[in-house]
Image (spheres, helix red, strand yellow):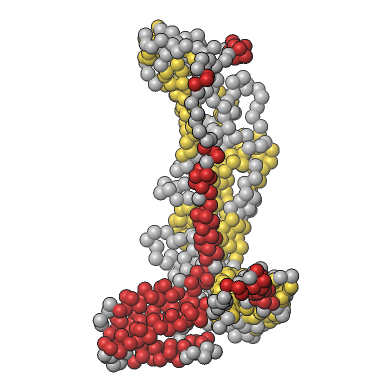
Amino acid sequence: MNLTMRPAAPRFLSGLALAACALAFLAVPRLATAQEDISISASASRNKVPPGSGFLFTVTVEASGAKRIPDPGQPDFGPIQTLGKSTSQSMAISGLSMKISRTITYQLVAPDEGAYTIPPISVKYNGKTYSTKPVTITVDGSAPAPPSSGRNRKGVFQNPPGAMDPFGNQRHTKSAEDDLFVTMEVDRTKLWLGQQAVATFSFWRAVDLWEKPGYRKPKFEGFWVEELLHANGDAEKTTLETRNGRKYALSRIRYAIVPLTPGKLTVDPAVLTASVDPWSRRRKLITRPVDITVSPLPDEGAPKEFSGMVVSNPEISLTSSSPSVKLNDSLFLTFTVLGNGYLKPATPPAAPKGDWFDAYDPKISDELIKTGDRLVTKRTVEYPVIARKEGVWALPPLATSWFDPQTGKYERYSASAGQVTVTGGAAAPQQALPRSTIEPGAVTARYIKPDIAALPDMGTPPHRRQWIWGVIVAPAPLLLLAWVYRRRRERLGENSALARSMAAATTARQRLDHAAGIAEPEMFFAELDQAARGYLADKWNIPAPSVTREAVAERLGEMDNGVAQDFDELFSAVEMARYARPAPERMKLLLEKTRGLVKTMEIEGRK
C-alpha cells in the first residue's frame, strides 16, 4: 500500500496534522488483520480401495491476508499405514490481496476389509479453531486395484558389487516370511564386568526392495557401545549368502559392547521396516532380545594398584625419550598399553617418585581401532620428568595390573626404562619465595615518587571526550542493519516459496539479457520461453511445466490490464516460431514485450 502526501504550505504541517497521519498509518495493520481468512480441507484420492492398495490423502490449508499458515500436524490414521509424506506451498497475488496455500499429501496403504474413518483435522489461528470434515475410507475386496508404476528404488542395504539383480526370479506381490528377516547375535552371553563382546545385526533379504528401509538400532542400556567398521571403512557390509538352498543378500552391522554394571543385562530388539512394492503394507522386522549375564570381578587376588583394565594378553611397553639429559632439562617416560577392550575407565600407573628428579601430571591419550573382529584400544601415558641432580640414575619403575577374562585371574606388570645420564647444564631456576614471606612485607610497601609536585597534566580523561563516545556508538546502526539483514535471510530460508517469489524478477531479467545476445531464432525463443514460464513458476511456486496457457488465463484473468492476454500472445508467438522463421525485428519486439510483462507483474505485486 502506498501512502502519498501532497506538498502544502508550512502552516498546515502542524502537530495536529502529523498526529492524524500517524493514527491513520497505525490503523492499517488492524484493517489487514480484520481481512484475514483461514480454511482447511481434507480429501482422499479414492474412497473405496481393495485391501493392501495404496492411495493418497491430501490436507490443504489456505490463508488470505494472513501472516503465516498454521501447521495442521499429523492426522490420526488409526490402522491405516503411512508410507510417506510430501509438502508443497504456493502463493498467489491478485491486486491488493495475497493468498497462501499449503498442501500436505500422505501416501497410505489400506488395511483389512472394513470402513475406516479419519477424524477431523484442526488448526488454530488467532484464538480460533478451523476443522475439516471426517473422511471415510471403505476397504473392499471387490474394489479395482490401481495400476502399478513398475518402478524400483534402491534402499540403504544395497545389492553386493557385481550383482545386477540377484532376485530376478524371486519377486512376489506379497513377500513371504522367509523373504525378509533379521537376526541379532552376540558372540558371548556370559561376561565379566568390563569384558568385550560383539553383537551382530543381520538383515536377510531374498527379494529386491521398493524403497529405503528404516532401521532403529538397540538402545544397549547398561553397555558402552562402539560401532565396528569393516576392512573398507564402512559400518555395513553386504554379501551374497545361500541359506536353506535359497540365495540372500546379507547385510551386517557389528557393535562392540562392554557391560558397565554387573547382573543381568538385555540387548533389546532392533527394528527394521521395509516394503517390496509400492502397494504392499510396510513390514516391521524385529530381532529377538538377547540376555547377557555379567559377573562382578573377583575380590580374591585383586592387587592394590589394580587399574580397572579388563583385557587379555595386552602388549605393554615403557620407554624413555632419551638415554641422557642435561641438568634441569626434561625427558619423558612413555607407558603404552595395546589390547582388546575398553581401556578408557582404567587409571594410569602412579606417577614415578625419586630424589634426583621432579615428576609432573601425565598426558593420557586413547586411540580406538575399530577395523577388525574386535575393538582394540591403544592407551598412551606420557610422564614429564625434569632432572635436578647430575649423575647416572636408574629410571623409576612403573607398575600396573589388569584382569584377564580368559583365565579369570589378575595379572601384574612392573618394569623400568633403564638408566639415564644427567650432565651439567644451566643453573636451576631460583625458587619463588613462599607466600608467608611476601604478604607481611606488602603491608608496609609504598611507592616512592620524590617529584610529586611536577606531575604532568594529562588533560581530559578519555571517557569524557565526545569523540570517544562517537566511536563507541557508531557501530550501533551497522549492527541494526546486520540484524535486519539476518532476519530477512532467516525468513527467506524458512519460507522457500517466498524466497523463490522474491527472486523471480531477477532471474527472469538475467535470462532475458542472455536471450538478447542470441541470434539463432530457435535458441532465442527457447530462452525467451524459459524466462517467461520460469518467472510465473517462481511467482506461483509451481513447476515450470505447469505454467500452461490455460493456467495463466485462470490465474491472471481477474486482472483488467490485459496481462493475461499478453502472456497468451507471447506463448503463441513462441509456438509459431517453431514452424516459421521470424524477422529479427519481431524477435526484438517480443523480447521488449516480455520485459514489460515482468515489470507490470512486479508493479501489481507491490500494490
Q: Nearer the viewer, residue 221 or 323?
A: 323
Q: Nearer the viewer, residue 486 or 305?
A: 486
541 over 191 or under it: above or below = below
Q: Quadrant of residue 81?
A: bottom right
283 over 368 or under it: above or below = below
Q: How many marks?
A: 0
Q: Nearer the viewer, residue 549 or 75?
A: 549
Image-based side of 390 in relation to 171, left or right: left
Residue 454: in sight, yes or no? Answer: yes
Quadrant location of the C terminus? bottom right
* Residue located at (60% from left, 73% from top): 11
* Residue located at (49% from left, 89% from top): 561
* Residue located at (38% from left, 14% from top): 325
Image-based side of 268 in relation to 462, left or right: right
Quadrant location of the N terminus? bottom right
- Where residue 258 appears, as percent x and y from the top left, is 59, 39
Q: Quadrant of residue 108?
A: bottom right
Residue 318: in sight, yes or no? Answer: no
- Where residue 429 appears, as percent x and y from the top left, is 45, 13
Q: Nearer the viewer, residue 468 or 115?
A: 468
* Residue located at (53% from left, 52% from top): 476
- Where residue 519 appears, as percent x and y from the top left, is 25, 81
- Where residue 95 appears, as percent x and y from the top left, is 55, 83
